[in-house]
Image (spheres, rainbow, N blue to C red):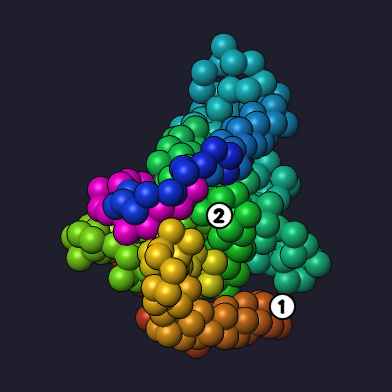
Amino acid sequence: MASGDLERGGGSNGKNRANNYYQSASTGPYYMESAEKQWTSWLVPMFVVANVAVFVVVMYINNCPKNNLGIEGSCVAKFLGRLSFQPLKENPLFGPSSNTLEKLGALEWNKVVHGDQGWRLITCIWLHAGVIHLLANMLSLVFIGIRLEQQFGFVRVGLIYLLSGFGGSILSSLFIQRNISVGASGALFGLLGAMLSELLTNWTIYTNKAAALITLVIIIAINLAVGILPHVDNFAHIGGFFAGFLLGFVLLLRPQFGWVERQHLPAGARVKSKHKAYQYVFWVIAVVLLIVGFTVGLVMLFRGENGNDHCSWCHYLSCVPTSKWRCGN
């Protein structure tokens, strides 16, 4: 989120051929024609705990009663003491000041490029602008992340989450250079992107796939559309989504059902290959695009390039001006 002044075990035995029900985190039920072990989700809950803990620490350091000058009004929820929130005129999301967020690792282009503080591309993922921001992101993380971790394990889901957040930070820094940005939204959009590419690359093992695809695309489109509102960093969403989408082709391949159940087939039976040819094609293309994308993005960023100079209309992807609000830069 950006603002102008602020902003996996248990296992299934898999011994009988069956259609296992797979409940997608956001696309509803459809069926997966394979029997695979289920992992216990622990990393995603740890991410949630970590984000909440970081927010509490940020509010403790913020110490509104001591540091608020009163220009924008008085602190909110004063009974919380030094954990109380900044005035709503300053931060309507019930959170800390922009100065506190910037001090503790918010994404800020000038400090990343000219202050040798590239670590902000990672730390900003763990910061949130307020309780509302934190609650929305953590509910989304639980809803999406736990099911993915149960299906694919903590290593792959953790990599997608972190690399997507990193990718979102890079794109955000290239296009938003006058405001700070914080939040896990880029990483969350990466998980959504990975769900989409996982469905596409493992297309032949699913039933009800067309309905699942349409539903997932609609959900993604709605969430991206929300990003055109002011004070929302949609470039982080877009960057995270595309990073996660490509990572899904690389990390979330499923073997064909016939290969999974090969040990239970009669002797002499023809065994399918582990993956289909198109899955390998997607894998190679995705790896190349990831390497090129991250390399080009980082080179442009640390050369001080402004993405808006290369794309005059791209700013509309993050904010569309209306009679109700202005977007500025």
Give the residue at x 65% y 66%. Answer: 109
Q: Are marks 1 and 2 in contact (CB under 8 Å)?
A: no
Q: CA distance from mark 1 to mark 2?
A: 28 Å
Disc 1 residue type? Phe
Foreground pick, 143 / 134: 143
Q: Nearer the viewer, mark 1 or mark 2?
A: 2
- Counting from the top left corner in percent of width and height, residue 328 is at 43, 65
SS class, disc 1: helix
N-terminal-most mark, 1 or 2: 2
- Is residue 34 part of the magenta span, yes or no? yes
Foreground pick, 275 / 45: 275
User: Left or right: where does residue 52 sit relative to residue 192?
Assistant: right
Give the residue at x 77% y 62%. Answer: 117
- Counting from the top left corner in percent of width and height, residue 204 is at 31, 70
In the displayed structure, 251 sits above or below 189; it is below
Q: Residue tagged by mark 1?
A: 302
- Counting from the top left corner in percent of width and height, residue 57 is at 69, 31
Q: Quadrant of residue 177?
A: bottom right
- Counting from the top left corner in percent of width and height, residue 107 is at 64, 58
Image: magenta residue range: 21-38
Foreground pick, 202 / 110: 202
Q: Residue tagged by mark 2?
A: 157
User: Left or right: where does residue 237 sit relative to residue 24?
Assistant: right
- Is residue 318 part of the magenta span, yes or no? no
